[in-house]
Image (cartoon, rainbow, N blue to C red):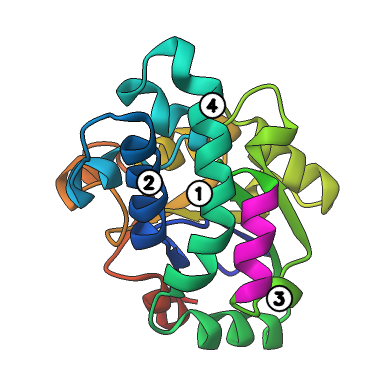
Amino acid sequence: MTHTKLIIFDLDGTLVDAYEAITVSFNHVMRTLGYPLRSCAVIRRAVGWGDKKLLEPFICAQDLPRALRIYRHSHKTDLLKKSRLFPGVRALLAFLRRKGYLLAIASNRPTRFSLILLRHLKIRAYFDYVLCADTLTRGKPYPDILKKIIKKLKVAPAEALYVGDMTIDIQAGVNAGIKTAVVITGSHTSSELTRQHPFLLLRSVSSLKKIL
């Protein structure tokens, strides 16, 4: 990867462990609206497509607008209490900056909450560009978010590496013509990820430091 100039990161499950915060916010909605509570494992599997799609399978259509309002109101506080960086993330980002890489975020999480996370965890300054799916017509697995980032930062697809944690991250990378590495710290298993033939399969995002 000697020609890599830009590294694009997914957020949840890749750099940030916000699953506890998501679970607390999700079950607050369930409790408030009288729906059954769901386990951490069930909620974790539903993460990655944005908050509307997170709630949609579990909520009647007529309740979804109210559910989203409740979720978002709760989540802005829960994120600050229950989110953390995965081990080695801060050191990795500092290393990549010292080496001169451009860095970006590509997340299906809404912009508002992505920025809350990045600022609260004190890593916003590492990134040249943050782009979230709520500003686009289509989120991942469509390639739009990755294509817009490389265009913004004036980098060719062959000069970028995308790092995520889900099968839709691999699909988005393939669709954008960008090499994609995936970590097994997110909502998909290593066997699920392997079947999608990623460029790299990593035990954690911090192991990227040794490879680069």
Element marked by disc 3: helix
Seen from the viewer's position, the closer of residues 11 and 69 is 69
Classed neighbour count for the residue bearing mark 1: other residues with Cα under 10 Å, few (<14), some (14–19), many (≥20)? many
Q: What residue span does the magenta drawing correspond to?
A: 112-120
Element marked by disc 2: helix
- What's the residue type where badge 2 is placed? His
- What's the residue type where badge 4 is placed? Arg
Q: Earlier in the sequence, mark 2 or mark 4?
A: 2
Q: Which residue is mark 4?
A: 66
Observer-side mark, 3 or 4, equals 4
- What's the residue type where badge 3 is placed? Tyr
Residue 28, numbered label: 2
Observer-side mark, 2 or 1, equals 2
Q: Earlier in the sequence, mark 3 or mark 4?
A: 4
Q: Which residue is mark 1?
A: 179
Q: Position of residue 210 (x, y in %)?
A: 41, 83
Q: Position of residue 206 (x, y in %)?
A: 41, 78
Observer-side mark, 4 or 1, equals 4
Q: Earlier in the sequence, mark 3 or mark 1?
A: 3
Disc 2 to disc 3, how far (Cα)? 33 Å
Disc 2 to disc 4, how far (Cα)? 12 Å
Seen from the viewer's position, the closer of residues 24 and 42 is 24
Seen from the viewer's position, the closer of residues 29 and 182 is 29
Seen from the viewer's position, the closer of residues 181 and 45 is 45
Q: Which residue is mark 3?
A: 126
